[in-house]
Image (tube, rainbow, N blue to C red):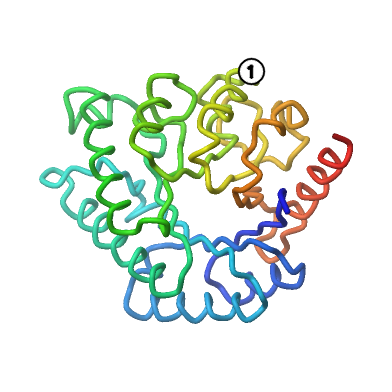
Amino acid sequence: MFPYLGLKASTDLAQIKNRLQYNPQVFEFYTDTHDLTSDGLIHLADMIDLVKAHGIHQIVIHHPMKYQQIHNEMFADATKATAEYNFLMSGSEKLIQLAIKHDVQVLLHGSYNEPISYIKTFYPSVTAARNLVFKRLAYFQSLGGDHVMFENSISPVFPFGDSTIDQRIFQANLRLCFDISHGFIYLHGNNQRLQTSLQRLAPHIVHYHLVDSMGKTHYSLPLGQGKIDWAALLPYLNVQATNIFEINLKDQMNCQEMIDSYQYLQQLTTAN
């Protein structure tokens, strides 16, 4: 029942065991480049089986955030950034194949937060980069179907909150992960516009990253410690979706801040 106790960890066994002691209902793996090697994929599959053995069946694999210290951007240029492009495409395809085999989900970022000046080193405009991204998202969705979802970020290439872009996402029938803090930051800390976007995209949202923010940059704060009005946005969330609490931890071997955020949201839902 929403909100779920959804926790996140790397593929490190010690981190996973720390999360499993709380009996989460949703588990998200945060992967890196090593996880896409032959040995890494075998280990990831083993960790998926381990999590499933604990009775958890809502499992998400988050694709690697970076390749050689560069964001794993969906708009990676095939000719000017060949290594990054190859990693994006082959890595995403491998994760989708793994997800289908093990009946789990893959989360791909539609964008991260590169400055417009960087985007324009590859494309004449943000719109051109966005058009390419939508083609790639359609390709990955054709491969993964109900096993793939796409996350928003702060970048103008693939944000949530702009009515025109939201409508385009809606028309493309994409399965979405809505990172609440990313939407809040993109909308410059405007709670009302955040709620509007959540309501507009709700039918397509299958997963949430629940995390607080001051609305300026990526703070990854526990719920209740930022400026997001959680009580006001609760009615706009799709209760059929899953969620994790994507909080910046003081210690990766201790997910207490995630547990605290879950308890905070539980109290709000009970009060409502």
* Residue 174 versus residue 6 in the image, above or below: above
Label 1 sits on residue:
192
Q: Left or right: where does residue 1 sit relative to residue 119?
A: right
**Could you say where residue 29 lies in the image, as x and y percent from the top left?**
53, 63
**Residue at left offset 60%, top offset 75%:** 51
**Residue at left offset 46%, top offset 70%:** 103
**Residue at left offset 17%, top offset 24%:** 124
Q: Residue 192 versus residue 220: which sits nearer the camera?
A: 192
Q: Left or right: where does residue 238 sit relative to residue 70?
A: right
Q: Left or right: where does residue 231 sit relative to residue 159?
A: right
Amino acid type shown at disc 1: Gln
Give the farthest residue toward the left: 79
How busy is the neighbourhood of tag 1: few (under 14 within 10 Å), some, or many (20 plus)? Answer: some
**Residue at left offset 31%, top offset 25%:** 116
* Residue 21 versus residue 246 in the image, above or below: below
Tell me where residue 189 sits by quadrant: top right
**Could you say where residue 10 lies in the image, as x and y percent from the top left?**
54, 65
Q: Left or right: where does residue 79 sit relative to residue 1?
A: left
Q: If the image is split into quadrants, where does the C terminus sit? A: top right
Q: If the image is split into quadrants, where does the N terminus sit? A: bottom right
Q: Residue 194 versus residue 83: which sits nearer the camera?
A: 194
Tell me where residue 97 sits by quadrant: bottom left
